[in-house]
Amino acid sequence: MLFFSSPFITELMLGQIYSLLALGLVAAWVADRRGKSTVSGVALGLVLAVKPQFAPVLLWPLVRRRWRSFVAALASGAAATLVGVVVAGPGTLIDWLTYASSRQPNGWVDINTIPGAAARLFRDNDWVEPLARLPWAVPLAFEIAVGIIILTVWWVRHDPEIGLWALVAASLLAPPVSWHNYLVVLGPGILLLLARGRTLPALLLLALQVIPPYGVLLFYPPGSTVGALMLNLYLYILLVHWLVFMLATNKKAVPAAPSAPMSTGL
């Protein structure tokens, strides 16, 4: 079902790299589970170098005091970025930073973030007539998204295995832009739910991933308040993913994987 899901098929059509990002997250997860903290951090850092919006995932090793993994993530991310600067030139980095800093949620129906929904519903935009004009709605939405990330880190701190995927889902809720196709990176978390015997929640998420990427356009242009709210369909789908991962965490502390032995020189 994941291979035939809408995010995966659309990603292939557009030549996007979200499956590679998912692979990097899986590599970090597997290495952490096997006690290879440095390898886990390197994989995590490479993912962040490609998509900095996953920066909240750095809290995954930090909150568990996996210092080696955290430092390795920072180092590998910086090294990969430096390689990119050398290859593409410093001007490209400056152009990218300028572009990224100027991005704001613009109300387009395929932006599936909390700030994106706030811009769509409570601010003038080129796509939808807002339900109301509330200038403080978007800043408040960013604050809510940051609060969700903090809540996620605290909630899943005892269950790092499912906790990573809950934190990845939370990190997709916060930036100005996050597309429907980003759901690909949550596919491994669904497989983990199946492995834990949580079949019904996993099947729910799989069913949600089958919904076509532009099914939301059935409600466009909205003719009512309900129609306007339904333009946030994929935000609701992302929120369900996040909530399922949160509820799937073990309340009791999960024993940490053994760290790789360090040489004593003897």
Image (cartoon, grey):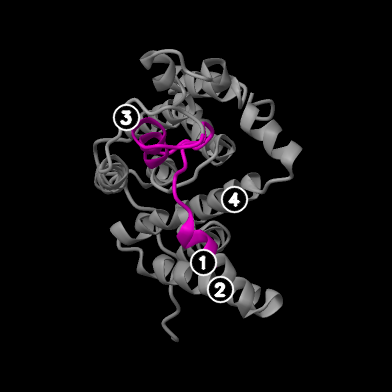
| Front disc: 4 or 2 | 2
For mark 3, what is the residue? 247
| Front disc: 2 or 3 | 2
CB within 8 Å, label 2 to label 1? yes
Q: Residues within 10 Å of mark 2 (few under 14, many from 20)?
A: few
Q: Does residue 108 show up magenta in the picture?
A: yes
**Separation of residues labelled 1 and 4 (CA atoms):** 24 Å
CB within 8 Å, label 1 to label 4? no
For mark 2, what is the residue? 94
Q: Position of residue 228 (x, y in %)?
A: 42, 21
Q: Earlier in the sequence, mark 4 or mark 3?
A: 4
Q: Position of residue 125 (x, y in %)?
A: 45, 37
The residue at the point 62 percent across, 77 percent down is: 91
Going by the numbered disc 2, the residue's amino acid type is Ile
For mark 1, what is the residue? 98
Going by the numbered disc 3, the residue's amino acid type is Leu
The N terminus: image quadrant: top right
**Separation of residues labelled 2 and 1 (CA atoms):** 6 Å
Q: Earlier in the sequence, mark 2 or mark 3?
A: 2
Q: Earlier in the sequence, mark 3 or mark 1?
A: 1
The residue at the point 34 percent across, 25 percent down is: 131
Q: Which mark is residue 3?
A: none
How many numbered marks appear?
Answer: 4
Secondary structure of residue under mark 2: helix
User: Which portion, as a residue range, is magenta?
Assistant: 97-126
For mark 4, what is the residue? 21
Q: Residues within 10 Å of mark 4 (few under 14, many from 20)?
A: many
